[in-house]
Image (cartoon, helix red, strand yellow):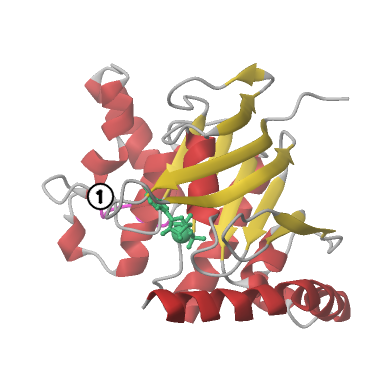
Amino acid sequence: MTTPALSLENVTCTFVSRDDRTQRYTAVRDTTLTIEPGEFVSVVGPTGCGKSTLLNVSAGLLAPSTGTVRVFGAPLEGINTRAGYMFQAEALMPWRNALDNVIAGLEFRGMPGAQAVAEGEEWLRRVGLGGFGDRYPHQLSGGMRKRVSLAQTLILDPDIILMDEPFSALDVQTRQLMENEVLDLWAAKRKAVLFITHDLDEAIAMSDRVVVLSAGPGTRPIGEFNIDLPRPRDVAEVRNQPRFVELHAAIWDVLREEVLKGYAQQRKVA
Ligand SMILES: Nc1ncnc2c1ncn2[C@@H]1O[C@H](COP(=O)(O)OP(=O)(O)O)[C@@H](O)[C@H]1O
Ligand SMILES: [Mg+2]
């Protein structure tokens, strides 16, 4: 047996309400989730169920109330330095051009400037932005900014890649291009990926395994599906395969009710 790249063991996350300190909300309850080295795992679940909470726990940005997180077998304390993250929100520094954004992490690590620039330019080429290094974020399209973020994350060569709905703000075509790009880059390096999404099609098209979360409070995994579609995959084309349709139906069968519960809760809160 190999040591998992990432494992969450009986993780529970309880928050104290900001408005009323006596109120507690348990977002995630008793969740166990393992990702093997090289495995691409997606977690799907209704909006507000606790997906980002699980990602933040995996990144070491949030300590679970109870339970353990292990990174290649070692208990995680503080920030997960083996992981790179890509979040839904824009995380580029507006005062730095694309190249300087891409190499920011290398600079923080103390890599000499010339070497960092050479690696940064190589990564910009790899994500299809060769020649765009001197553009500032506001001079780039949404898809291009995502490419810069991707290069910024992958240039550090993390063993674990954590992505929280990274492409949800993009139009469908750009999104599919980005998804294919991520799959190509992943195939070359085979890192462990935890990919959070509320989009089941995206989850199936990208992953080796899809984990379904229940609606909150007390979210936990309620289904797990191996995605036995052949690779390499084109995310747009794979959707037409009969096996994709079959998997989609099976997973949606588990997810549908949770999505409805999730909507009901959001309406109560609103
Ligand atoms: N820091 C926090 N303090 C209080 N409640 C929080 C905090 N972070 C998340 N929550 C609550 O936990 C639940 C899950 O949030 P989140 O993980 O962001 O959901 P998702 O990413 O699945 O949409 C939500 O009800 C949210 O309001
Ligand atoms: Mg979220």
Residue that extends furthest to the front in the rendered view of this protein: 22
- Using the image, determine if residue 137 lies above or below residue 85: below
Principal secondary structure, stretch drawn in magenta: loop
Which one is in front, 11 or 234? 11
Position in image of residue 197 (x %, y %): 56, 63
State the extent of the magenta-drawn residues as a range.
Answer: 128-132
Q: Quadrant of the C terminus?
A: bottom left
Give left or right: position of 267 versus 51.
left
Residue depicted at 74% across the width and 74% down the height: 238
Which one is in front, 65 or 137? 65
Residue depicted at 68% across the width and 69% down the height: 234
Q: Quadrant of the N terminus?
A: top right
Position in image of residue 99 (x %, y %): 25, 43
Q: Which residue lies under the disc numbered 1?
A: 92
Position in image of residue 163 (x %, y %): 51, 50
Position in image of residue 37 (x %, y %): 72, 33
Give left or right: position of 24 versus 160.
left
Q: What residue type is labelled 1?
A: Leu
Secondary structure under the numbered disc 1 in the rendered image: loop
Residue depicted at 33% across the width and 62% down the height: 144
Which one is in front, 123 or 226? 226
Residue depicted at 44% across the width and 31% down the height: 156
Quarter of the rendering containing residue 66: top right
Label 1: how many Cα within 10 Å (few below 14, some 14–19, many 20+): many
Which one is in front, 179 or 252? 252
- Using the image, determine if residue 100 lies above or below residue 94: above
Q: Is residue 143 visible?
A: yes
Number of numbered discs on residues: 1
Answer whether residue 176 is magenta in the image: no
Quarter of the rendering containing residue 78: top left
